[in-house]
Amino acid sequence: MPSSKDAKRDKTPNRLSSGIEELDHILGGGFPAKRLFLIEGPPGSGKTTLALQFLLAGAKNSEKGFYVTFSESEDEIRAVAESHGWTLDGIHLQELSTLGDRLKNEEQYTVFQPADVELSETVQRVIDDVRRLKPQRVVIDSLSEIRLVARDPLRYRRQILALKEILSECDCTVFFLEDYTVENPDLLLQSIAHGVVLLEKNQSEYGSVKRTLQVTKLRAGPSLEGSHDFAIRYGGLQVFRRLIASDSLNGERPKDASGILKTDNEELDRLVGGGVRWGTGLVLVGPAGTGKSTVGIQIVSAAARQGYKTCAFLFDEAKATYIKRAKNVDLDLGSHMENGIIEISQVDPNEQSPGEFAYRVRRKVEDEGVRLVVIDSLNGYLTAMTSERFLLAQLHELLAYLSSHGVLTIMTTAQHGMLNTTDTTSFELTYLADLVIYLRYFEAGGNVRKAISVIKNRLSAHETNIREFEITDKGLEIGKPLRQFEGILTGIPKFVGETDDLMNSSSKSGTKGATAG
């Protein structure tokens, strides 16, 4: 039978909020109380900001905070806080930047037994202040200074082990901040810490710095593994946890996706098999200018008229251009935007990480009840990723999440080239979608015309015909099936029938109608 001491040891420790809701979720509820944690990363990765948020979260709950800085002055720490609009009331700051003068060689050697520990004068001051102030949260910034002054790895390890031993007796939760300023970081810190949070930053070839966070170790229980994007904005770190579709349901059953959304275009509905289904992904594929965005706008307008909330994320074109394009085809989105049914957001992929984008989509769905999401286009979304491989993985999870919430997703993707459709990213993406509408150019009678067809629909029967279509000031006009084609499987269909079978063949001369997209 276990003793009371064993029961106390086995009891799950209380969790302390980091001050960042998403990080608390990653940690399984927050940092376990009365434990030591290592926050590591290169200079400028956000360690100090995270530590201050941790202390401020405690101050809100009347918990004393103690910040010890070896490398920065007190004024510099306060300047960091002021840059985020914070006041450090309730947090005691201790500046020990004279560590180098005080840690002399004869003061370095310590032993492991707590009763016999002999720390240097400066480190002893930290212990004395912790015992005097009795803080619940402590930050030591940073251990790199102790490492550099100690020089001898053995001395450094003895200092850290002794410091950890005494702090563990003070019933406080401790953050050790560590800079990657040496080529081979000592793994001792990771071994003695109860948990390790790694902050990283990567400079892309163009655009802002991309920052990621990983919980590489946590002894108290499972954490959300993997890399999570975050940004440093006014107000501190904003963490965007990695999207896992199965976790988003919180034990609930996925929403029924059996309903059908009519597009308000009879021929388009007939082409796709009666309409588009909720909880599915639709990809519009084709060269630039064939009308992918316009077909998407047709579906958006139909959903808005039926009262379904829509959010369109534009990666390639301006919001004003998108609205004007809709007006040109007699689809006025303005009134729906005014009453909040449609929201259009312009996204800069050079400034927003994929994790932040997925977080924004999740908030729209869960907090605002959005039922239709538009991503225009995947080519622009790709620029936010490090490679096409990550694009497919991220989209797979995002579409699974949206499907489980009964959301219809419309994506557009342009081919590399006007006519050639072989060996392109567009078709690599189609396996993710339930419905694929293919738009293309064809030549007949010396004119460039447009054709539309459905090449895939997982959930219902659909037309296998190729239809000609036009985009006019009255909207999307789809003609009857065209059967006089050759070379369909090559991706470059050639019309070999009579011109009388084509739309408006008697008056066709050059370009006509509204601008396509």
Image (cartoon, rainbow, N blue to C red):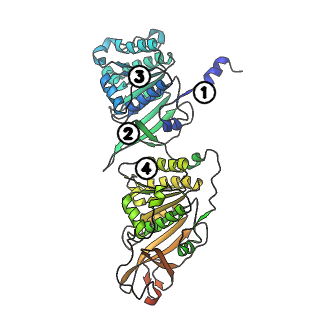
Q: Secondary structure at mark 2?
A: strand
Q: Position of residue 69 (x, y in %)?
A: 35, 22
Give how far across and how far down residue 258 sits, in percent.
64, 62
Q: Nearer the viewer, residue 328 or 81?
A: 328
Return the disc, 3 or 2, that comes first in the chain's sequence.
3
Q: Is residue 243 above or below residue 168?
A: below
Q: Earlier in the sequence, mark 4 or mark 2?
A: 2
Q: Earlier in the sequence, mark 3 or mark 4?
A: 3
Residue picked out by circle 4? 354
Cα separation between marks 3 and 1: 31 Å
Q: For the residue marked with disc 3, what is the amino acid?
A: Asp
Gap between marks 3 and 2 measured at Cα: 21 Å
Q: Secondary structure at mark 1?
A: loop
Measure the C-alpha gap from mark 1 to mark 4.
35 Å
Residue 247: tell me if it is visible.
yes
Q: Where does label 3 land, which residue?
A: 89
